[in-house]
Amino acid sequence: MVRKYVVSPGGRRGAHPDIGSALRAAAARGRAARIEIAPGQYEEQLTVHGEVELVAAGEPGSVVVSRPRGTVLTAFGSVVVRGLVLTGRDADAGVVHCRGGSLALDRVEVRAHNGVCVHVSPGASATLTDSGFRFGRTVFTGAAGVVERCRFAAAADNAVAVIESARVTIRDSRVDGARIHGVRVSDAWAQLTGCEITGTERAAVIADTQAELTVEGCRIEGVHGPALQFVEQSRGAVRGTRVRDAENGILVASGADPQVRNCVFTGCRDTGIHVQDAGRGAFEDCEVVDAGNVGVLSTRGGAPQMSGCRVSGGNVGIAVTDHARGRFTGCLVRDLTGVGLRVLDESKAVFEDSRVERCPFGLDTKGNGGTTAELTGVAFADFDMIAVAAVGQSRVTLRAAVAERGLLGFGAGEEAQLHLHDCTVTGVETGGALAFGTARLVARNLTVTGAQSYGLCGTGSAFVDVAGSRFEDCAATGLRFDESCGGRLVDCSVTGTSKTAVQHTGRVQLVSLRTTLPVKEITEPAPPPTIVNNYHGPVFVEAVHSAQLAWGNTNVAQQQTLQGRPDDRGEQTGDAGHAGVDRPRRAPTAPASPHASASPTSPHDPTAPNAPTDPDGASR
């Protein structure tokens, strides 16, 4: 039978003046006890043993128990606390510390200034219902716990920590404004159901160090970091969860492998789904809306698998970059400002039975030969620029792909390789397929219908290998090959109202072609004349007479003898005291073109007197 004890600060008859005296009386009897506490302020440190219930006699919150420093309530045995407010400061062990047995907090408020609200030690268990925890964290260390309809507010670090093999279930609770994480699960097991988490500075919910975490039917919004984070080989599941306004909707890294289903990530500032550093994960029936950078990103060795997912709005739909992988089945990507699908930098991606619509670019790939994309049953519709663009040395294989209503269907440039099998292009404004640079384009059973310019074009030094393909109703030409483009056509047909079936330079072998339209060989223009400019001598633009020229010499001495009557020499020279002596004069020069230089004359030109000689005696 439970014995009742009453506590009243006034010390009325039959009541204990403080809680401590009632606990001592209950311990002396060694029986189950119920201690009813009258409203008021109690500055005490309580240590509870055995089977004890502490109850506020008035409304919840009317009884305040506090201490200036340290732990307020230490529990051993089976302890229930109802309706109390427990306040402490600098309580590293917890304002409430369950050291053994079981503890239940019902309609309790715990305030921990610069400390821990509740600490449940290894082997103990705690049940928290309809309670509030402010400023400090709640820690389950190797313990068991159930949290229902509680609120954790303004925690100075993590709001709830489940660590060291603890097992905790959290239902219908709320976490606001934690300085680090809302809920951290480390080397432990936890399940969150129907919870709301807002305003955390780092990941709202994180699982690390081989933790196992299940998140179901939760709502996370307005967080500075990722909404959900699985790292360090953690496992678990996320189902039916909604995320809004986070840096990342879910971040998976370092070997973690969660199962994510039926979740929505809206307005994420960077990425909706982010997998990196050997992270994996299976994502099914998820939606990413208006991601600031990339809807779904696999990077730095990430390897997710996605099925039935939808990406809309934002910049890039699905990107696989920097040695990453990914398999995407039954996905829908639409209404982006950039590119629907992207594969870069030695990454490998597989897309199956998916659709990309209303994006400027459908798929772009770039990187070395290790960059590959394989697409099967993928449709591109209403693209502004190009459905598929492969550049660098990347390799793209399309099977049963469709491109409709855009500028250009499929293209390969630089040193890329593009393989088309059973693909269709319809209603494009320019052409069905294009190869340029030194790219290689291989097409089998390609069908291009209604291109407003050409069906297929090769230019530069590209190589095309086209077999079993049809080009219908292309406005200008079925196939056009310019410059040094080479290759072959086998068992192809060109029909419709095109002006020509094929225009080529003779470098593409027309092995077999069915058409009633003309085939024209493009005559290559003659190479321009070679112009050699000599910048080592004069160029004269007018007739020059009596010129003396010298070049290629370090020193030049010139003399000129004046011609005239013998008795006029003194006047000719202008020096009567030195008649008959020639005076050196500067050689006259001819006007030169401003756009050219002089060209050399013969080294034996008699008009260049006193030319110096090389050391071996040869005149220069």
Image (cartoon, helix red, strand yellow):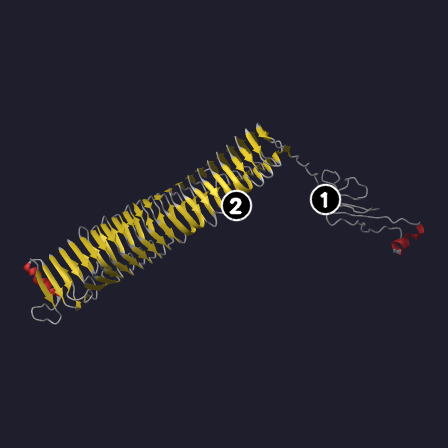
Residue underneath mark 1:
536
Residue at image x 57%, y 27%?
Answer: 512
Query: Where, quadrant-wise, is the C terminus in this rendering?
Result: top right
Residue 497 vs residue 604: left or right? Answer: left
Q: Nearer the viewer, residue 614 or 388?
A: 388
Q: Nearer the viewer, residue 538 or 285?
A: 285
Query: Of helix, strand and loop, which one carries label 1?
Result: loop
Percent across and percent down for residue 437 are 56, 39
Q: Quadrant of the rendered structure where residue 612 is?
A: top right
Most distant residue in the front direction: 496
Dot 2 alpha-carbon crowd within 10 angstroms: few under 14, some 14 to 19, many 20 or more = some
Residue underneath mark 2:
385
Query: Of helix, strand and loop, which one carries label 2?
Result: loop
Percent across and percent down for residue 276 are 38, 45
Query: Where, quadrant-wise, is the N terminus in this rendering?
Result: bottom left
The label shown at residue 17 is none
Q: Amino acid at mark 2?
A: Met
* Visible residue check, residue 99: no
Residue at image x 61%, y 32%?
Answer: 517
How far apart marks 1 and 2 lie (CA) works out to 52 Å
